[in-house]
Image (cartoon, rainbow, N blue to C red):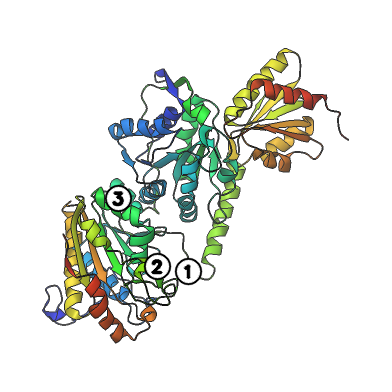
Amino acid sequence: MCLAATPGYPMSKSYKRPASLVDRATHYCPGCGHGILHRLVAEVVDELGIREKVISVAPVGCAVLAYHYWDFDSAEAAHGRALAVATGIKRVRPDNVVFTYQGDGDLAAIGTAETIHAANRGENLTVIFVNNAVYGMTGGQMAPTTILGQKTATTPRGRSVKDEGYPLKIMEMLALLDGVAYAERTLLVNPREVLNTRRAVKEAFLNQMAGKGFSIVEVLSMCPTYAGKNPTDAIRWVSENLAKIFQPGRLK
Amino acid sequence: MSKEITVLMSGNESIGEGAIRAGLKFYAGYPITPQNELTAYMAEHLPLRGGIFLQSESELAAINMVYGASAAGARVMTTSSSPGISLKQEGLSYIAGAQTPVVVANVMRAGPGLGNIWPAQSDYFQATKGGGHGDYHMIVLAPSTVQESLDLTREAFDLADRYRIAVMILSDGMLGQMMEGVTMPAAEEPPVPVAKPWALTGAAGRRKNIVCSLFMERDGVEKNNLLLQRKYRRIAHNETRLEAYRMADASAAIVAYGTMARIGRSVVDAMRARGVRVGLLRPITLWPFPAREIARFSHKTKRLLVVEMSYGQMVEDVRLTADKKAVVHFYGRAGGGIPTHKQVERELTRFLARKKRG
Protein backbone atom coordinates (compact mmCIF):
# COMPACT_ATOMS: atom_id res chain seq x y z
CA MET A 1 0.00 0.00 0.00
CA CYS A 2 1.39 3.34 -1.08
CA LEU A 3 1.07 6.28 1.31
CA ALA A 4 0.08 8.56 -1.57
CA ALA A 5 -3.06 6.49 -1.93
CA THR A 6 -3.98 6.97 1.73
CA PRO A 7 -6.63 9.60 2.36
CA GLY A 8 -5.08 12.70 3.86
CA TYR A 9 -1.88 12.45 1.86
CA PRO A 10 -1.99 14.79 -1.17
CA MET A 11 -0.48 13.57 -4.41
CA SER A 12 1.90 16.51 -4.63
CA LYS A 13 3.91 15.50 -1.55
CA SER A 14 3.42 11.97 -0.36
CA TYR A 15 5.57 11.93 2.78
CA LYS A 16 5.28 14.91 5.06
CA ARG A 17 6.36 15.36 8.64
CA PRO A 18 3.29 15.17 10.89
CA ALA A 19 2.52 18.44 12.71
CA SER A 20 2.81 16.56 16.00
CA LEU A 21 6.39 15.56 15.22
CA VAL A 22 9.16 18.08 15.89
CA ASP A 23 11.67 18.66 13.10
CA ARG A 24 14.82 17.42 14.79
CA ALA A 25 17.15 14.44 14.67
CA THR A 26 16.47 11.76 17.27
CA HIS A 27 19.09 10.23 19.54
CA TYR A 28 18.10 6.71 18.54
CA CYS A 29 20.57 4.25 17.04
CA PRO A 30 20.42 3.34 13.34
CA GLY A 31 17.76 0.68 12.76
CA CYS A 32 15.94 1.31 16.05
CA GLY A 33 12.15 1.01 15.98
CA HIS A 34 11.39 4.00 18.23
CA GLY A 35 11.65 6.56 15.41
CA ILE A 36 9.07 4.71 13.32
CA LEU A 37 6.71 4.31 16.26
CA HIS A 38 7.07 7.95 17.36
CA ARG A 39 6.05 8.94 13.86
CA LEU A 40 3.06 6.59 13.85
CA VAL A 41 1.83 8.08 17.12
CA ALA A 42 2.28 11.60 15.73
CA GLU A 43 0.42 10.67 12.53
CA VAL A 44 -2.49 9.23 14.49
CA VAL A 45 -2.64 12.26 16.81
CA ASP A 46 -2.75 14.52 13.73
CA GLU A 47 -5.34 12.38 11.98
CA LEU A 48 -7.63 12.37 15.03
CA GLY A 49 -7.14 16.13 15.46
CA ILE A 50 -6.16 15.79 19.12
CA ARG A 51 -2.72 17.47 19.17
CA GLU A 52 -4.06 20.20 21.47
CA LYS A 53 -5.71 17.69 23.82
CA VAL A 54 -3.16 14.94 24.05
CA ILE A 55 -0.83 14.49 27.05
CA SER A 56 1.88 11.85 26.86
CA VAL A 57 3.76 10.22 29.69
CA ALA A 58 7.31 9.24 28.81
CA PRO A 59 9.05 6.30 30.50
CA VAL A 60 12.56 5.79 31.75
CA GLY A 61 14.48 3.96 29.07
CA CYS A 62 15.54 4.84 25.55
CA ALA A 63 12.26 6.69 24.93
CA VAL A 64 12.62 9.03 27.92
CA LEU A 65 13.21 11.94 25.52
CA ALA A 66 10.14 11.17 23.41
CA TYR A 67 8.69 14.51 24.52
CA HIS A 68 11.47 16.30 22.64
CA TYR A 69 10.23 14.70 19.43
CA TRP A 70 6.48 15.17 19.89
CA ASP A 71 4.94 18.60 19.77
CA PHE A 72 2.37 18.21 22.52
CA ASP A 73 2.22 18.31 26.33
CA SER A 74 4.17 15.60 28.13
CA ALA A 75 5.16 14.40 31.57
CA GLU A 76 8.18 12.33 32.41
CA ALA A 77 7.62 9.54 34.93
CA ALA A 78 10.03 7.74 37.21
CA HIS A 79 11.02 4.27 36.02
CA GLY A 80 7.95 2.05 35.89
CA ARG A 81 5.53 4.66 37.21
CA ALA A 82 4.14 5.96 33.92
CA LEU A 83 0.71 4.42 34.41
CA ALA A 84 0.38 5.83 37.94
CA VAL A 85 1.32 9.27 36.61
CA ALA A 86 -1.08 8.88 33.68
CA THR A 87 -3.84 7.80 36.07
CA GLY A 88 -3.40 11.04 38.03
CA ILE A 89 -3.46 13.17 34.88
CA LYS A 90 -6.47 11.47 33.32
CA ARG A 91 -8.52 11.46 36.52
CA VAL A 92 -8.24 15.23 36.90
CA ARG A 93 -8.42 15.97 33.16
CA PRO A 94 -10.85 13.40 31.75
CA ASP A 95 -11.38 15.45 28.59
CA ASN A 96 -7.74 15.21 27.59
CA VAL A 97 -6.37 12.22 25.71
CA VAL A 98 -3.64 10.66 27.86
CA PHE A 99 -1.22 7.95 26.79
CA THR A 100 1.93 6.30 28.07
CA TYR A 101 4.80 5.16 25.89
CA GLN A 102 6.78 2.49 27.72
CA GLY A 103 9.45 -0.09 27.12
CA ASP A 104 9.52 -3.68 28.30
CA GLY A 105 11.62 -3.02 31.39
CA ASP A 106 9.51 -0.04 32.39
CA LEU A 107 6.13 -1.66 31.85
CA ALA A 108 6.78 -5.33 32.61
CA ALA A 109 9.56 -5.37 35.25
CA ILE A 110 9.87 -2.35 37.52
CA GLY A 111 6.36 -1.11 36.70
CA THR A 112 4.48 -4.42 36.75
CA ALA A 113 2.29 -3.43 39.70
CA GLU A 114 1.38 -0.04 38.21
CA THR A 115 0.62 -1.69 34.86
CA ILE A 116 -1.61 -4.43 36.24
CA HIS A 117 -3.53 -2.16 38.60
CA ALA A 118 -4.10 0.66 36.10
CA ALA A 119 -5.36 -2.00 33.67
CA ASN A 120 -7.49 -3.67 36.30
CA ARG A 121 -9.08 -0.37 37.31
CA GLY A 122 -9.95 0.04 33.67
CA GLU A 123 -8.33 3.47 33.53
CA ASN A 124 -9.42 5.12 30.31
CA LEU A 125 -5.87 5.35 28.95
CA THR A 126 -3.90 4.37 25.88
CA VAL A 127 -0.65 2.46 26.30
CA ILE A 128 2.02 2.09 23.63
CA PHE A 129 4.24 -0.73 24.82
CA VAL A 130 7.53 -1.26 22.99
CA ASN A 131 9.02 -4.73 23.37
CA ASN A 132 12.52 -5.08 21.97
CA ALA A 133 13.53 -7.78 24.47
CA VAL A 134 16.41 -5.81 25.94
CA TYR A 135 17.32 -2.82 28.13
CA GLY A 136 18.77 -0.41 25.59
CA MET A 137 19.60 2.73 27.49
CA THR A 138 21.64 1.03 30.21
CA GLY A 139 23.67 -1.12 27.88
CA GLY A 140 21.83 -4.22 26.77
CA GLN A 141 20.84 -6.06 29.92
CA MET A 142 18.18 -8.78 30.19
CA ALA A 143 14.60 -7.54 29.95
CA PRO A 144 11.56 -9.36 31.32
CA THR A 145 10.79 -10.17 27.68
CA THR A 146 14.27 -11.43 26.77
CA ILE A 147 13.74 -14.83 25.14
CA LEU A 148 15.33 -18.11 26.18
CA GLY A 149 18.87 -18.43 24.90
CA GLN A 150 19.15 -14.71 24.12
CA LYS A 151 22.53 -13.29 25.12
CA THR A 152 22.54 -9.96 26.92
CA ALA A 153 25.00 -8.10 29.16
CA THR A 154 23.48 -9.86 32.19
CA THR A 155 22.80 -13.22 30.52
CA PRO A 156 26.17 -13.65 28.78
CA ARG A 157 25.54 -17.36 28.28
CA GLY A 158 21.97 -16.82 27.17
CA ARG A 159 18.77 -16.63 29.21
CA SER A 160 18.05 -19.96 30.86
CA VAL A 161 14.89 -21.23 32.48
CA LYS A 162 16.91 -22.45 35.42
CA ASP A 163 18.44 -19.09 36.34
CA GLU A 164 16.20 -16.40 34.87
CA GLY A 165 12.89 -18.06 34.19
CA TYR A 166 10.69 -17.55 31.17
CA PRO A 167 10.05 -14.39 29.16
CA LEU A 168 7.11 -12.57 30.72
CA LYS A 169 3.98 -12.53 28.58
CA ILE A 170 2.40 -9.59 30.29
CA MET A 171 -0.06 -8.92 27.45
CA GLU A 172 -1.56 -12.37 27.87
CA MET A 173 -1.89 -11.62 31.59
CA LEU A 174 -3.50 -8.25 30.94
CA ALA A 175 -5.95 -9.72 28.46
CA LEU A 176 -7.42 -11.76 31.33
CA LEU A 177 -8.37 -8.64 33.28
CA ASP A 178 -11.93 -7.35 33.11
CA GLY A 179 -10.69 -3.75 33.09
CA VAL A 180 -8.85 -4.14 29.78
CA ALA A 181 -10.87 -3.06 26.74
CA TYR A 182 -8.32 -3.71 24.04
CA ALA A 183 -4.99 -5.51 23.76
CA GLU A 184 -3.16 -6.17 20.52
CA ARG A 185 0.40 -7.15 19.61
CA THR A 186 1.93 -5.89 16.36
CA LEU A 187 5.30 -5.67 14.60
CA LEU A 188 7.43 -3.02 12.87
CA VAL A 189 9.32 -5.41 10.58
CA ASN A 190 8.00 -4.35 7.17
CA PRO A 191 5.76 -1.64 5.66
CA ARG A 192 2.67 -3.82 5.92
CA GLU A 193 3.26 -4.45 9.61
CA VAL A 194 4.09 -0.77 10.18
CA LEU A 195 0.72 0.21 8.72
CA ASN A 196 -0.96 -2.48 10.77
CA THR A 197 0.69 -1.02 13.87
CA ARG A 198 -0.60 2.41 12.86
CA ARG A 199 -4.12 0.97 12.69
CA ALA A 200 -3.78 -0.58 16.14
CA VAL A 201 -2.39 2.64 17.65
CA LYS A 202 -5.31 4.53 16.16
CA GLU A 203 -7.77 2.03 17.58
CA ALA A 204 -6.21 2.37 21.03
CA PHE A 205 -6.66 6.15 20.86
CA LEU A 206 -10.19 5.92 19.48
CA ASN A 207 -11.14 3.61 22.34
CA GLN A 208 -10.08 6.20 24.88
CA MET A 209 -11.93 8.95 23.05
CA ALA A 210 -15.04 6.77 23.10
CA GLY A 211 -14.56 6.11 26.84
CA LYS A 212 -14.08 2.37 26.37
CA GLY A 213 -11.23 2.04 28.85
CA PHE A 214 -7.74 0.61 29.06
CA SER A 215 -6.28 -0.02 25.61
CA ILE A 216 -2.79 -1.34 25.03
CA VAL A 217 -0.74 -2.05 21.92
CA GLU A 218 2.45 -4.06 22.29
CA VAL A 219 4.84 -3.35 19.44
CA LEU A 220 7.65 -5.82 18.80
CA SER A 221 10.61 -3.68 17.83
CA MET A 222 14.26 -3.86 16.86
CA CYS A 223 17.34 -3.01 18.86
CA PRO A 224 20.18 -3.74 16.43
CA THR A 225 22.79 -2.28 18.79
CA TYR A 226 22.18 -4.76 21.57
CA ALA A 227 21.11 -7.59 19.34
CA GLY A 228 24.63 -7.26 17.92
CA LYS A 229 23.21 -7.29 14.41
CA ASN A 230 22.93 -4.98 11.45
CA PRO A 231 19.48 -3.39 11.05
CA THR A 232 18.33 -5.93 8.45
CA ASP A 233 19.34 -8.91 10.53
CA ALA A 234 17.80 -7.30 13.62
CA ILE A 235 14.48 -7.08 11.78
CA ARG A 236 14.80 -10.70 10.74
CA TRP A 237 15.49 -11.71 14.36
CA VAL A 238 12.28 -9.99 15.50
CA SER A 239 10.22 -11.75 12.80
CA GLU A 240 11.80 -15.15 13.20
CA ASN A 241 12.56 -15.33 16.92
CA LEU A 242 10.82 -12.72 19.04
CA ALA A 243 7.48 -13.01 17.22
CA LYS A 244 7.53 -16.79 17.79
CA ILE A 245 7.39 -16.29 21.56
CA PHE A 246 5.24 -13.16 21.47
CA GLN A 247 2.71 -13.99 18.81
CA PRO A 248 1.27 -11.01 16.98
CA GLY A 249 -2.46 -10.52 16.86
CA ARG A 250 -5.37 -9.30 18.82
CA LEU A 251 -5.50 -10.66 22.37
CA LYS A 252 -8.64 -8.84 23.39
CA MET B 1 -18.00 37.56 59.47
CA SER B 2 -19.36 34.21 58.49
CA LYS B 3 -20.69 31.90 61.17
CA GLU B 4 -18.17 29.63 62.84
CA ILE B 5 -18.64 26.09 64.03
CA THR B 6 -16.62 24.01 66.47
CA VAL B 7 -16.39 20.32 65.73
CA LEU B 8 -14.80 17.50 67.70
CA MET B 9 -12.33 15.84 65.36
CA SER B 10 -9.20 13.72 65.42
CA GLY B 11 -5.93 15.15 64.20
CA ASN B 12 -6.07 12.83 61.20
CA GLU B 13 -9.57 13.96 60.25
CA SER B 14 -8.66 17.61 60.65
CA ILE B 15 -5.86 17.21 58.11
CA GLY B 16 -8.45 15.81 55.72
CA GLU B 17 -10.90 18.62 56.39
CA GLY B 18 -8.20 21.26 56.00
CA ALA B 19 -7.17 19.80 52.66
CA ILE B 20 -10.72 19.68 51.31
CA ARG B 21 -11.29 23.29 52.38
CA ALA B 22 -8.09 24.24 50.54
CA GLY B 23 -9.62 23.02 47.29
CA LEU B 24 -8.10 19.54 47.16
CA LYS B 25 -8.96 17.94 43.81
CA PHE B 26 -7.11 14.63 43.89
CA TYR B 27 -6.10 12.35 46.74
CA ALA B 28 -4.38 8.97 46.48
CA GLY B 29 -3.47 6.88 49.50
CA TYR B 30 -2.71 3.39 50.74
CA PRO B 31 -3.74 1.97 54.11
CA ILE B 32 -1.30 2.25 56.99
CA THR B 33 -1.76 2.75 60.73
CA PRO B 34 -1.91 5.24 62.50
CA GLN B 35 -3.25 7.43 59.68
CA ASN B 36 -6.14 5.27 58.40
CA GLU B 37 -8.82 7.71 59.62
CA LEU B 38 -7.37 10.26 57.23
CA THR B 39 -7.71 8.03 54.18
CA ALA B 40 -11.20 7.02 55.29
CA TYR B 41 -12.15 10.69 55.77
CA MET B 42 -11.04 11.42 52.23
CA ALA B 43 -12.95 8.44 50.84
CA GLU B 44 -16.07 9.59 52.67
CA HIS B 45 -15.97 13.33 52.03
CA LEU B 46 -13.77 14.20 49.06
CA PRO B 47 -15.96 12.75 46.25
CA LEU B 48 -18.99 14.57 47.71
CA ARG B 49 -17.12 17.88 47.69
CA GLY B 50 -15.76 18.02 44.18
CA GLY B 51 -12.62 15.93 44.46
CA ILE B 52 -11.36 12.52 43.41
CA PHE B 53 -10.37 9.79 45.88
CA LEU B 54 -8.28 6.84 44.79
CA GLN B 55 -6.98 3.95 46.88
CA SER B 56 -3.72 3.10 45.17
CA GLU B 57 -2.06 -0.30 44.87
CA SER B 58 1.03 0.97 46.72
CA GLU B 59 2.67 4.04 48.18
CA LEU B 60 4.83 4.26 45.07
CA ALA B 61 1.73 4.43 42.92
CA ALA B 62 0.07 6.97 45.25
CA ILE B 63 2.92 9.46 45.13
CA ASN B 64 3.22 9.08 41.37
CA MET B 65 -0.51 9.51 40.88
CA VAL B 66 -0.41 12.80 42.78
CA TYR B 67 2.67 13.82 40.78
CA GLY B 68 0.66 13.27 37.60
CA ALA B 69 -2.47 15.02 38.86
CA SER B 70 -0.34 17.93 40.06
CA ALA B 71 1.45 18.10 36.71
CA ALA B 72 -2.03 18.43 35.20
CA GLY B 73 -2.69 21.47 37.41
CA ALA B 74 -4.77 20.06 40.29
CA ARG B 75 -4.34 20.55 44.03
CA VAL B 76 -3.22 17.14 45.25
CA MET B 77 -2.43 15.24 48.40
CA THR B 78 -1.20 11.89 49.61
CA THR B 79 -0.78 10.80 53.21
CA SER B 80 0.88 7.94 55.02
CA SER B 81 2.90 6.96 58.06
CA SER B 82 6.64 6.41 58.35
CA PRO B 83 7.24 3.13 56.44
CA GLY B 84 4.89 4.33 53.70
CA ILE B 85 6.61 7.70 53.57
CA SER B 86 9.91 5.89 52.98
CA LEU B 87 8.34 4.34 49.90
CA LYS B 88 7.31 7.77 48.65
CA GLN B 89 10.84 9.18 48.70
CA GLU B 90 11.55 8.36 45.07
CA GLY B 91 8.46 10.27 44.00
CA LEU B 92 9.25 13.21 46.28
CA SER B 93 12.66 13.55 44.66
CA TYR B 94 11.08 13.66 41.17
CA ILE B 95 8.49 16.12 42.47
CA ALA B 96 11.29 18.36 43.75
CA GLY B 97 13.15 18.17 40.43
CA ALA B 98 10.06 18.79 38.30
CA GLN B 99 8.68 21.41 40.72
CA THR B 100 5.14 20.04 40.96
CA PRO B 101 3.24 21.31 44.01
CA VAL B 102 2.02 18.53 46.30
CA VAL B 103 0.99 18.24 49.94
CA VAL B 104 2.02 15.13 51.88
CA ALA B 105 1.18 14.24 55.47
CA ASN B 106 3.34 11.91 57.54
CA VAL B 107 1.60 10.71 60.69
CA MET B 108 4.83 9.39 62.18
CA ARG B 109 5.14 6.05 63.91
CA ALA B 110 8.07 4.25 65.46
CA GLY B 111 10.87 2.73 63.41
CA PRO B 112 13.27 1.69 62.08
CA GLY B 113 11.81 -1.01 59.88
CA LEU B 114 8.24 -2.00 60.54
CA GLY B 115 8.70 -0.68 64.09
CA ASN B 116 5.32 -0.33 65.67
CA ILE B 117 2.26 1.89 65.38
CA TRP B 118 3.06 4.10 68.38
CA PRO B 119 3.85 7.78 67.95
CA ALA B 120 7.39 8.91 67.18
CA GLN B 121 9.33 11.85 65.77
CA SER B 122 12.08 9.76 64.23
CA ASP B 123 11.48 10.92 60.65
CA TYR B 124 12.77 14.46 61.25
CA PHE B 125 15.99 13.82 59.32
CA GLN B 126 14.09 12.23 56.44
CA ALA B 127 11.60 15.09 56.28
CA THR B 128 13.98 18.03 56.63
CA LYS B 129 17.23 16.85 55.03
CA GLY B 130 15.95 15.48 51.73
CA GLY B 131 14.93 11.86 52.15
CA GLY B 132 15.17 10.96 48.48
CA HIS B 133 18.15 11.41 46.17
CA GLY B 134 19.51 14.75 45.06
CA ASP B 135 19.80 18.19 46.65
CA TYR B 136 16.31 19.25 47.59
CA HIS B 137 14.02 20.34 50.39
CA MET B 138 10.36 20.20 51.22
CA ILE B 139 8.62 22.78 53.35
CA VAL B 140 7.89 20.88 56.59
CA LEU B 141 5.10 22.10 58.86
CA ALA B 142 4.71 20.69 62.37
CA PRO B 143 1.27 21.18 63.97
CA SER B 144 0.93 20.58 67.69
CA THR B 145 -2.86 20.68 68.07
CA VAL B 146 -5.80 19.32 66.13
CA GLN B 147 -6.80 22.90 65.26
CA GLU B 148 -3.35 23.59 63.91
CA SER B 149 -3.43 20.34 61.91
CA LEU B 150 -6.37 21.81 60.01
CA ASP B 151 -5.00 25.35 59.72
CA LEU B 152 -1.52 24.35 58.57
CA THR B 153 -2.84 21.80 56.08
CA ARG B 154 -5.08 24.43 54.57
CA GLU B 155 -2.17 26.80 54.26
CA ALA B 156 0.18 24.09 52.96
CA PHE B 157 -1.65 24.12 49.62
CA ASP B 158 -1.02 27.84 49.16
CA LEU B 159 2.66 27.39 49.98
CA ALA B 160 2.91 24.41 47.61
CA ASP B 161 1.43 26.41 44.74
CA ARG B 162 3.33 29.61 45.52
CA TYR B 163 6.72 27.90 45.48
CA ARG B 164 5.95 24.86 43.29
CA ILE B 165 7.22 22.58 46.02
CA ALA B 166 6.23 19.59 48.15
CA VAL B 167 4.92 20.60 51.56
CA MET B 168 4.89 17.98 54.29
CA ILE B 169 2.62 18.06 57.32
CA LEU B 170 4.67 16.27 59.96
CA SER B 171 2.20 14.87 62.48
CA ASP B 172 2.54 11.79 64.67
CA GLY B 173 0.43 8.91 65.93
CA MET B 174 -0.49 10.78 69.11
CA LEU B 175 -1.59 13.97 67.40
CA GLY B 176 -3.31 12.04 64.63
CA GLN B 177 -5.39 9.95 67.00
CA MET B 178 -6.30 12.53 69.67
CA MET B 179 -9.58 14.43 69.43
CA GLU B 180 -10.03 18.13 70.13
CA GLY B 181 -12.48 20.87 69.22
CA VAL B 182 -11.68 22.53 65.91
CA THR B 183 -13.16 25.90 65.03
CA MET B 184 -13.73 26.79 61.40
CA PRO B 185 -16.16 28.78 59.25
CA ALA B 186 -19.47 26.97 58.83
CA ALA B 187 -19.32 27.43 55.09
CA GLU B 188 -16.31 28.35 53.01
CA GLU B 189 -16.01 29.41 49.42
CA PRO B 190 -13.52 27.23 47.55
CA PRO B 191 -10.29 29.16 47.05
CA VAL B 192 -9.66 30.87 43.72
CA PRO B 193 -7.56 28.53 41.56
CA VAL B 194 -3.94 29.59 41.12
CA ALA B 195 -2.80 30.16 37.53
CA LYS B 196 -0.43 27.38 36.46
CA PRO B 197 0.86 28.23 32.99
CA TRP B 198 3.38 25.38 33.24
CA ALA B 199 0.72 22.67 33.76
CA LEU B 200 -0.20 19.92 31.30
CA THR B 201 -3.61 20.87 29.94
CA GLY B 202 -3.10 20.14 26.25
CA ALA B 203 -1.00 22.44 24.07
CA ALA B 204 -3.90 24.53 22.78
CA GLY B 205 -2.91 28.05 21.68
CA ARG B 206 0.50 27.83 23.29
CA ARG B 207 3.80 25.98 23.02
CA LYS B 208 3.95 22.53 24.53
CA ASN B 209 4.61 22.10 28.24
CA ILE B 210 6.90 19.40 29.58
CA VAL B 211 6.98 18.39 33.24
CA CYS B 212 10.28 16.60 33.82
CA SER B 213 13.36 16.40 36.00
CA LEU B 214 15.77 15.21 33.28
CA PHE B 215 17.76 17.89 31.48
CA MET B 216 20.09 16.47 28.87
CA GLU B 217 22.15 19.56 28.06
CA ARG B 218 25.58 19.40 29.70
CA ASP B 219 24.73 22.06 32.29
CA GLY B 220 20.96 21.44 32.41
CA VAL B 221 20.74 19.67 35.75
CA GLU B 222 23.18 22.08 37.39
CA LYS B 223 21.03 24.97 36.18
CA ASN B 224 17.91 23.30 37.58
CA ASN B 225 19.71 22.82 40.90
CA LEU B 226 20.73 26.49 41.03
CA LEU B 227 17.14 27.47 40.35
CA LEU B 228 15.95 25.22 43.19
CA GLN B 229 18.57 26.60 45.56
CA ARG B 230 17.47 30.18 44.84
CA LYS B 231 13.90 29.11 45.58
CA TYR B 232 14.93 27.44 48.85
CA ARG B 233 16.74 30.61 49.96
CA ARG B 234 13.62 32.64 49.18
CA ILE B 235 11.48 30.25 51.23
CA ALA B 236 13.92 30.32 54.15
CA HIS B 237 13.78 34.12 54.06
CA ASN B 238 9.97 34.37 53.87
CA GLU B 239 8.40 31.39 55.56
CA THR B 240 10.29 30.53 58.73
CA ARG B 241 8.03 30.24 61.78
CA LEU B 242 8.63 29.75 65.48
CA GLU B 243 6.32 30.10 68.44
CA ALA B 244 7.98 31.64 71.53
CA TYR B 245 5.95 30.82 74.65
CA ARG B 246 6.66 32.63 77.95
CA MET B 247 10.13 33.48 76.68
CA ALA B 248 10.35 37.17 77.69
CA ASP B 249 12.40 36.61 80.84
CA ALA B 250 13.20 32.92 80.47
CA SER B 251 16.60 31.76 81.61
CA ALA B 252 16.03 28.32 80.12
CA ALA B 253 13.81 26.98 77.38
CA ILE B 254 12.46 23.71 76.14
CA VAL B 255 12.79 23.40 72.35
CA ALA B 256 10.20 20.98 70.98
CA TYR B 257 7.71 20.56 68.13
CA GLY B 258 4.45 18.70 67.58
CA THR B 259 3.30 16.41 70.36
CA MET B 260 6.44 17.08 72.40
CA ALA B 261 5.71 20.81 72.36
CA ARG B 262 2.38 20.08 74.09
CA ILE B 263 4.18 18.29 76.91
CA GLY B 264 6.83 21.02 76.94
CA ARG B 265 4.13 23.67 77.32
CA SER B 266 2.57 21.98 80.34
CA VAL B 267 6.03 21.59 81.92
CA VAL B 268 6.69 25.31 81.39
CA ASP B 269 3.32 26.23 82.95
CA ALA B 270 3.91 23.98 85.96
CA MET B 271 7.39 25.35 86.61
CA ARG B 272 6.32 28.96 86.04
CA ALA B 273 3.62 28.40 88.69
CA ARG B 274 6.48 27.71 91.09
CA GLY B 275 8.33 30.82 89.97
CA VAL B 276 10.94 29.14 87.73
CA ARG B 277 11.63 31.32 84.69
CA VAL B 278 11.38 28.86 81.81
CA GLY B 279 9.82 29.10 78.36
CA LEU B 280 9.13 27.09 75.23
CA LEU B 281 10.50 27.53 71.73
CA ARG B 282 8.34 25.66 69.25
CA PRO B 283 9.49 25.47 65.63
CA ILE B 284 6.40 25.41 63.39
CA THR B 285 8.44 25.16 60.21
CA LEU B 286 11.01 22.39 60.59
CA TRP B 287 12.28 23.25 57.14
CA PRO B 288 13.04 26.08 56.79
CA PHE B 289 14.37 25.72 60.33
CA PRO B 290 13.90 28.89 62.44
CA ALA B 291 17.66 29.24 62.86
CA ARG B 292 17.93 33.02 63.14
CA GLU B 293 15.07 33.20 65.63
CA ILE B 294 16.52 30.50 67.87
CA ALA B 295 19.97 32.10 67.63
CA ARG B 296 18.48 35.39 68.79
CA PHE B 297 16.78 33.81 71.81
CA SER B 298 19.94 31.91 72.70
CA HIS B 299 21.76 35.21 73.34
CA LYS B 300 19.58 35.73 76.40
CA THR B 301 18.30 32.26 77.20
CA LYS B 302 21.47 30.30 77.55
CA ARG B 303 20.07 26.89 78.40
CA LEU B 304 18.12 25.04 75.76
CA LEU B 305 16.65 21.61 76.45
CA VAL B 306 15.65 19.93 73.21
CA VAL B 307 13.00 17.25 73.75
CA GLU B 308 12.03 14.84 70.98
CA MET B 309 10.40 11.47 70.44
CA SER B 310 13.66 10.42 68.82
CA TYR B 311 17.23 9.86 69.92
CA GLY B 312 18.30 13.31 68.81
CA GLN B 313 17.47 14.64 65.37
CA MET B 314 16.20 18.24 65.62
CA VAL B 315 18.80 18.81 68.33
CA GLU B 316 21.46 18.86 65.60
CA ASP B 317 19.81 21.89 64.01
CA VAL B 318 19.46 23.61 67.39
CA ARG B 319 23.17 23.00 68.11
CA LEU B 320 24.10 24.44 64.73
CA THR B 321 22.09 27.60 65.29
CA ALA B 322 22.31 28.36 69.02
CA ASP B 323 24.77 30.94 70.25
CA LYS B 324 28.05 29.31 71.23
CA LYS B 325 27.58 30.55 74.80
CA ALA B 326 24.24 28.73 75.12
CA VAL B 327 24.27 25.17 76.40
CA VAL B 328 22.15 22.70 74.46
CA HIS B 329 20.97 19.61 76.28
CA PHE B 330 18.92 16.77 74.85
CA TYR B 331 16.31 14.40 76.18
CA GLY B 332 14.42 11.96 74.03
CA ARG B 333 12.77 8.58 73.78
CA ALA B 334 11.63 6.73 70.68
CA GLY B 335 10.39 3.36 69.49
CA GLY B 336 7.01 4.16 70.99
CA GLY B 337 8.31 5.59 74.25
CA ILE B 338 6.97 9.08 74.86
CA PRO B 339 8.78 11.47 77.22
CA THR B 340 6.32 12.17 80.04
CA HIS B 341 5.65 15.49 81.75
CA LYS B 342 7.47 14.17 84.83
CA GLN B 343 10.53 13.07 82.88
CA VAL B 344 10.81 16.35 80.97
CA GLU B 345 10.40 18.38 84.15
CA ARG B 346 13.06 16.28 85.87
CA GLU B 347 15.47 16.82 82.94
CA LEU B 348 14.87 20.56 82.92
CA THR B 349 15.28 20.83 86.71
CA ARG B 350 18.59 18.94 86.58
CA PHE B 351 19.72 21.08 83.65
CA LEU B 352 18.96 24.26 85.62
CA ALA B 353 20.84 22.94 88.64
CA ARG B 354 23.99 22.35 86.62
CA LYS B 355 26.77 24.87 87.12
CA LYS B 356 26.96 27.54 84.46
CA ARG B 357 29.78 27.20 82.01
CA GLY B 358 32.10 30.02 80.98
Point out which mark residue A117 bears: 3
User: As shown in the figure, which amino acid type bears the numbered disc 3?
Assistant: His
Q: Is residue B150 left or right of residue A233?
A: right
Residue B168's place in the image compared with A63, above or below, is above
Q: Which residue is drawn at 74% across and 25% down?
A: B348
- Is B247 rendered above or below residue B47? above
Crowd tier of the residue under label 2, counting other residues whose Cα lies within 10 Å: few below 14, some 14–19, many 20 or above: few
Residue A163's tag is 2
Residue B112 at x, y percent in the picture? 56, 42
Residue B230 horizontal/vertical position (percent): 58, 53
Q: Report which residue position mark 1 lands on.
A: B216
Q: Position of residue B164 (x, y in %)?
A: 47, 48
- The amino acid beneath tag 1 is Met
Taking the spot 35% from the left edge, 50% from the top edge, the residue there is B72
Are discs 1 and 3 less than 8 Å apart at CB?
no
Residue depth check, mark 1 versus mark 3: number of the one nearer the observer: 3
Give the chain of mark 2. Answer: A
**Disc 2 to disc 1, how far (Cα)?**
36 Å
Which structural element holds mark 1?
loop
Report the amino acid beneath label 2: Asp
